[in-house]
């Protein structure tokens, strides 16, 4: 399918999870990520922009009943074994007790945030 230059997607500006409790989720991800949000809208949004300009955020919809769990973020770490040990010590819950899966290109483990969303702690080979 051909697209015109003006309408072609040229990248991803941010990836967000919807959350039930923005304050609780902001605390969780601040601890996980290791730095304070770079943008906050009280009662609604928190986002973290990394040195490479990738942005991750959480959003609490006005109608919290519209929240649905998400899955798909891969957070890069330099040493997955050390990261998992640290996160587990801080109470982050992992599937299969933090078992590390291996693919041809990476290592990964599936974790859960305080809101019911899943994410992957990920190390490229």
Image (tube, helix red, strand yellow):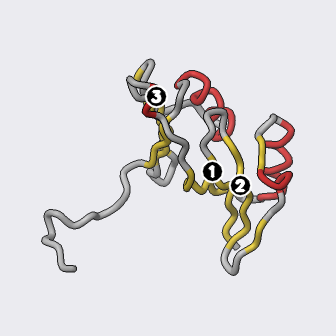
**x and y percent of residue 110 in the render?**
71, 54
Cβ–Cβ under 8 Å for marks 1 and 3: no
User: Foreground residue, 49 or 117?
Assistant: 117
Between discs 3 and 2, the one toward the N terminus? 3
What is the distance, in whole Å, between disc 1 and disc 3 at their CAs?
Answer: 21 Å
Query: Which residue is label 1 attached to?
Result: 119
Cβ–Cβ under 8 Å for marks 2 and 1: yes
Query: The C terminus appears in which quarter of the rendering?
Result: bottom right
Near mark 1 (Cα within 10 A), the count class, few <14, some 14-19 or many ≥20, is many
Q: Which residue appears farthest toward the front when viewing the image? A: 65
Between discs 2 and 1, the one toward the N terminus? 2
Asked if residue 104 lies left or right of residue 25, the reply is right
What is the distance, in whole Å, between disc 3 and disc 2 at their CAs?
Answer: 25 Å
Query: Which residue is label 2 attached to?
Result: 110
* Local SS, label 2: strand
Identify the residue at image location x=48%, y=54%.
52
Query: Which residue is label 3 attached to?
Result: 65
């Amino acid at each position: 399918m051909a697209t015109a230059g003006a309408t072609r997607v040229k990248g991803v500006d941010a990836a967000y999870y919807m959350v039930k409790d923005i304050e609780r989720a902001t605390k969780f991800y601040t601890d996980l990520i290791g730095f304070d949000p770079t943008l906050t809208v009280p009662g609604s949004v928190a986002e973290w922009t990394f040195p490479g300009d990738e942005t991750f955020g959480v959003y609490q919809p006005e109608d919290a009943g519209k929240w649905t769990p998400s899955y798909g973020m891969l957070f890069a770490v330099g040493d997955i074994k050390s990261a998992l040990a640290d996160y587990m010590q801080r109470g982050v819950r992992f599937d299969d007790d933090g078992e590390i899966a291996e693919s041809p290109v990476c290592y990964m483990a599936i974790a859960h945030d305080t809101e019911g969303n899943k994410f992957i702690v990920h190390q490229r080979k």
